[in-house]
Image: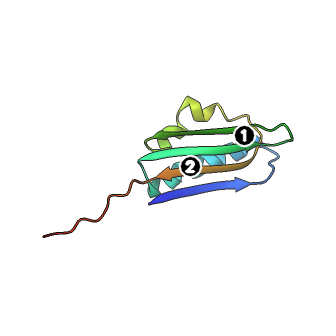
Amino acid sequence: MCGIAGFIGESKNSQASFAILSKLFSKVEIRGVDAAGYWMAETGNQGRIFYHKQPGKSSDLVKSDTWKANVDININLALVHARGASRGIVTGK
């Protein structure tokens, strides 16, 4: 299983939007704890793209300096992802 969340649109309060996205990112962890990542686009014609992925829980990534460094970015598109590794099918013989 995996979980994906995000938003599209311009925010009048980028820090509030980031706080909501952080909460979403932590909650999507229920769908997978093996890896987490994000992709964000900054508002404007010269907007930058930010992305990161790493093994582990999304709640751990949200607590990291890597995630917190994005708090002041005025993003207009964000996707967050929590991955659960496939365990395969076990059959008894």
Amino acid on which the number 2 mark rests in the picture? Phe
Q: Is residue 75 above or below residue 93?
A: above
Locate residue 4, reporting x and y percent. Answer: 56, 56
For image coordinates 48% across by 58% down, the residue present is: 2
Quarter of the figure with the C terminus = bottom left
Residue type for callout 1 = Gln
- Determine the residue positioned at 32% across, 58% down: 87
> Which of the 4 quarters of the picture holds residue 66?
top right
Residue at screen point 67% across, 35% down = 70
In this rendered view, identify the residue nearer to me: 63 or 77.
Answer: 77
Q: Which residue is disc 1 drawn over?
A: 15
C-beta proximity under 8 Å, tags 1 and 2: no
> Taking 56 as reference, is 7 above or below it?
below
Judged from this view, the residue extending furthest toward the right is: 45
| Residue 30 percent location from the top left of the image | 45, 56
Residue 71 location (% of width, % of height): 68, 35
Task: Please determine whether, in this image, residue 81 is positioned above or below residue 52.
Answer: below
User: Considering only order in the chain, which callout, 2 or 1, is on the residue closer to the N terminus?
Assistant: 1
Q: Is residue 37 left or right of residue 87?
A: right
The residue positioned farthest toward the front in the image shown: 93
Residue 80 vs residue 64, the one in the foreground: 80
Specify the label residue 91 is tagged with: none
Q: Residues within 10 Å of mark 1 (few under 14, many from 20)?
A: some
- Mark 2 sits on what residue? 25
Q: Quadrant of residue 37?
A: top right
Residue at disc 2, secondary structure: helix
Q: What colour scheme was applied to this rendering of the protein? A: rainbow
- Looking at the image, which residue is at 52% across and 36% down? 63
The local crowd at label 2, few if under 14, some if 14 to 19, many if 20 or more residues have their Cα within 10 Å, is: many
User: Which marked residue is nearer to the observer: mark 1 or mark 2?
Assistant: 2
Q: Position of residue 49 (x, y in %)?
A: 71, 39
User: Which quarter of the image is occupied by the N terminus?
Assistant: bottom left
